[in-house]
Every structure is written in structure tokens, then in C-alpha cells.
Amino acid sequence: MGRLSTHVLDTAHGRPAAGMGYALHRVEGQARHKLAQGVTNADGRTDAPLLAGADFAPGRYELSFEVAAYFRAQGVSLPEPAFLDVVTLTFGMAEGHYHVPLLVSPYGYSTYRGS
């Protein structure tokens, strides 16, 4: 059995990105199937794993984060259109625990497979 979790850090302000919208999709060929959506909690995380137990399946996934909306809600003045609007990470999972953190500012981001 596997598990998928995420954590978003606002590197522009040096804190967790509380209240950032996200959506998780399973990708099968050209089709995308929404599995989860919500907003990050006060620690920049989801309240529960995005996938766990019987819901976890190996395959390709997309995890999207509403970056521009988050920074605008924080009072950051962004151009229209914003440089980063929605950051979408496309990744594959086989077995095990996958933690996909996002470190983000209005003008850049990074991610990796965490633990």
C-alpha cells in the first residue's frame, strides 16, 4: 500500500502556505480524473493524505496549486496575468510513500520527492 501527501511553503514570506487551493487528478492517456481538491491548512498541508490505502494506485498524477490566487489573498500585488497562475506538477507513483512538497514564490517554485 502507498500514500501521497503534500506540503506547500511560501518562500516569499518564509512560512507555510495556509489557504492555498489544490486539486489532484489521475492521468490516464488523455483523460484526467479529479480525485481530490481543497485548501491547505495552517501548516500548509492537507488534513489527511491525498491518497492512502485502497485509494492509492500506481500511475501518473497531476497535483495543481492555485499560486496567483494565494499570493493575491496575501496582499501581494501581481501583474495581470500573473507569471505563475496555477502550478501543475505531473509525476508518476509506483509503490510506497510519496511526499510532494512545493516551495513557491510569485516568480518561481521547486519540488522534489520528499519523505
Image: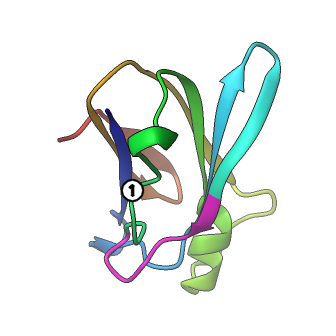
Q: Residue furthest front?
A: 54
| Quadrant of the rendering where the C terminus is positioned | top left
Q: Residue furthest left?
A: 115
Is 34 part of what is drawn in magenta?
Answer: no
- Write the residue at 33% across / 63% down: 11
Name the main secondary structure of what is drawn in magenta: loop
Residue 32 to residue 94: above or below: below
Q: Is residue 102 visible?
A: no
- Write the residue at 77% across / 31% down: 32
Along the viewing direction, whichever of 34 and 109 lies nearer the viewer: 34
Range shown magenta: 37-44
Q: Where is residue 26? Give x, y as percent.
A: 65, 32
Q: Which residue is mark 1?
A: 49
Residue 44 to residue 49: above or below: below
Along the viewing direction, whichever of 79 and 85 lies nearer the viewer: 85
Q: Where is residue 1? Give x, y as percent.
A: 31, 32
Q: Where is residue 46? Give x, y as percent.
A: 42, 66
- The amino acid type of the residue labelled 1 equals Pro
Q: Where is residue 31? Give x, y as percent.
A: 82, 24
Along the viewing direction, whichever of 59 and 107 lies nearer the viewer: 59
- Write the residue at 37% across / 40% down: 110
